[in-house]
Amino acid sequence: MKRLLLVFLLFTAVVSAQDATKVNLTNPNATIYTHLYFLQSDSYQPEKAARTIYPNATKNPKNAAIKLKKILDGKGLFVDFKQVPKSTNYKDTTGVENPNKYVLFPYDMPFISVEKLGNNWYYSRETIANLNQIYNDVFPWYISKLEDFLPEFGQKKIFNIALWKYVGLLMLLLLAFVLHVVFKRFTFFILQKTHNYFLKNDGTAIAQVLKKLAHPISLLVALRFFDKIYPSLQFGLTINKWVFLGLHITQTVFWIYVFLKLVKVIMYVYAEFTAKTHSKLDDQLVPILNNFLTGLVIFFGILKMLTVFGIDTTAVIAGASIGGLAVALASQDTVKNLLGTFMIFLDKPFHIGDWIEAGGVEGSVEEVGFRSSRIRAADTSIFQIPNSKLSEIVINNKGLRLFRRYNTNVGLRYDTPPELIEAFVKGVREIIIAHPETRSESDSYNVEFTGFGDSSLLILINVYFKSLAWGVEQSSKHKLHIAIVKLAKELGVDFAFPSSTVMIEQFPEKQSLDLKYNIDQERIDGVIKNQLEDFNKNKS
C-alpha cells in the first residue's frame, strides 16, 4: 500500500511539473520559450507550441512550429533567453516598420522574428510567409528523399548518433576538399588572366601574391559549401552550435586574410605605377596607404568577429566613437599632424629628395610619415618636423627650381684703368658663355660695373647653373672662379681688399705708389682670346 501511495505521489509530481509551464504569449521572451519548451523531448506537446503561430497565418501551425525549431537547430542557433526582452510593450528602435517586433538572430536569420498582434506576441507574419523558403534553404529537398533510401544498418546509433550521419559527414568533408583543390586552380587562373589583361604584366612577384590570394578564396568556397550542406545531416543543437561557431570564426579569419592579400596586391600595383611617375612623394604614400588599408581591414574584421560571438557591434561602434572623440580631444596635436599629412599629400609642396627651406630648417626631404616629416640637413643631421607645422609655414622648395642662381660681387682696385675694367667685364662674359654648366642666353647672366665700394670698384656677376645638384653646382663655381682669377692675372688686374691709402703731396725724394697698368688694346684682346682658349681646353 505504501508503495502504491509513493508511486501515485511521484506520478502526481511529474504531471504537476509538466503542467507548471503553460502557454505564455505576453512578451517576446515568453513566446519563444513556450515554442521551444513544448518541442523538447521531455516536454513534447506540439499543439501548445503551435499556439505561438498567429491564428490563420498558416493552415498547419503545428507543422510550422516544428519547422521553425528544426531551422534553429539545423543552423546551431542557440537562444540566449537572458538577451530576449521580457517587456510586454517592447519596441525595436532600429527604424523597422513595425516597432513592436523582435528579431531573434538579426545577422544569421533576419527573417525569423516575433511581433505583437493585439495583446499577444506571435511569430511574425513575415516569418510564416517565408518559412518554407527558409526551411528549403537549410534542408534541401533531396535530403528527405535520401533518407528513404538509407539501409537499416545506417540507422544504427553510435554515441546516440545515427551511423549514416558519420558517413555523410566524412563524405561532406571529402567533397569540400575536392572543391577546394579544383576551385583553387580555377581562381588562380582567373586572377592571373585578369591581371595580365589590365596590367599587361605577368611578373613572378605579383603571381606569387595572386597565388596566395587564390588559396583562401577557394577555402571560403569550400567552407560555404560545407555550411550549406551540413545542416542536412541533422546533428543535435549542441553539436551544431559549436560546429557553426567554428565555421563562422574560420570564415571570418579567411575573409580578413583575403582582404589583407588584396591590399597587398593593390599596393603592389600602385607601387609599380608610382615608380613610373616623376613624383617621389607618391612612392612615400605607398607604405602610409598600405598601413591605413591594413588597419581598416583589421578593424572591420574585428567587428565581424564580435558579431560571430553575438556582440552588438552598434554599441561597440558607439562606444568607440565616444572614446575616439575623447582621445581626439586629448591628443589634438596628433590629429592636427594627421590632417597636416593629408594636406601635404594633396597639395604636394615638395617631393622626396627635394631640397627645401622651411621655418629656418634647410635640407633634403627624406620621408613623410603619418605624424612628421624627416629632413636631412647639409651636415647630414636630421630634422623631424611635425606635419601640422610643415603644412602651415612658408616652404621654399629649392628642388623645384629650374636653375641654380649664383650671385656675387668682385672688387677691383680703385686705380684700375677704365680700359682694363671693360676688358675684365668682357672677359668674364665670354667665360660665362663658354662655361658648359651656365646658361649663355643674353638675358640669363649679368656682368656689370655696378658701383663704388669702400675699398673697391664693384663688378656684379650673376649667373644661373643648369644642374640642380648641390655637388655639381660647387664644381661649376670652382671652374668659373679659376677662370676669372686667371683672366685677372693675365690682364694685370688686381682684386681689392679693405685698405687705407695715405696721400702725401710734395714729399721730397719720394715717388708715387701708383701701379703701372698696360692698357694696350691689342695685348688685351690677345689675353682674353688666350684665356678663352685655355678655359675651353680645361672646362671638361
Image (tube, rainbow, N blue to C red):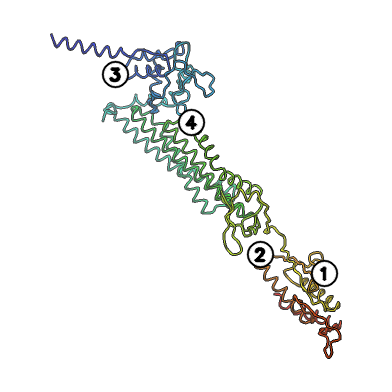
Amino acid carrying label 2: it is: Ala
Q: Count every numbered label the image shows and give the total.
A: 4
Kindly report the distance in space between the C-alpha atoms of the residues bearing marks 1 and 2: 32 Å
Question: Which residue is disc 4 drawn over?
Answer: 315
**Residue 88 location, x and y as percent?**
44, 15
**Which numbered disc flags the more N-terminal residue, 1 or 2?**
1
- Tell me the quarter of the image containing the C terminus: bottom right
The reply to whether dot 1 and dot 3 touch (C-beta < 8 Å) is: no
| Quadrant hosting residue 456 | bottom right
**Residue 2 location, x and y as percent?**
13, 10
Amino acid carrying label 1: it is: Gly
**Which numbered disc flags the more N-terminal residue, 4 or 3?**
3
Kindly report the distance in space between the C-alpha atoms of the residues bearing marks 3 and 2: 89 Å
Question: Which residue is disc 2 drawn over?
Answer: 469
Which residue is at 36% across, 26% downward? 146
Compared across the picture, whether 342 is left or right of 306 comes to: right
| Quadrant hosting residue 501 | bottom right
Q: Which mark is residue 42?
A: 3
- Tell me the quarter of the image containing the N terminus: top left
Kindly report the distance in space between the C-alpha atoms of the residues bearing marks 4 and 1: 78 Å
- Towards the viewer: 307 or 383: 383
**Which numbered disc flags the more N-terminal residue, 3 or 2?**
3
Nearer to us: label 4 or label 1: 1
Question: Which residue is disc 1 drawn over?
Answer: 451
The reply to whether dot 3 and dot 2 touch (C-beta < 8 Å) is: no
Nearer to us: label 1 or label 3: 1
SS category of the residue bearing label 2: loop
Q: Which mark is residue 162?
A: none
Kindly report the distance in space between the C-alpha atoms of the residues bearing marks 1 and 3: 115 Å
Kindly report the distance in space between the C-alpha atoms of the residues bearing marks 4 and 3: 38 Å
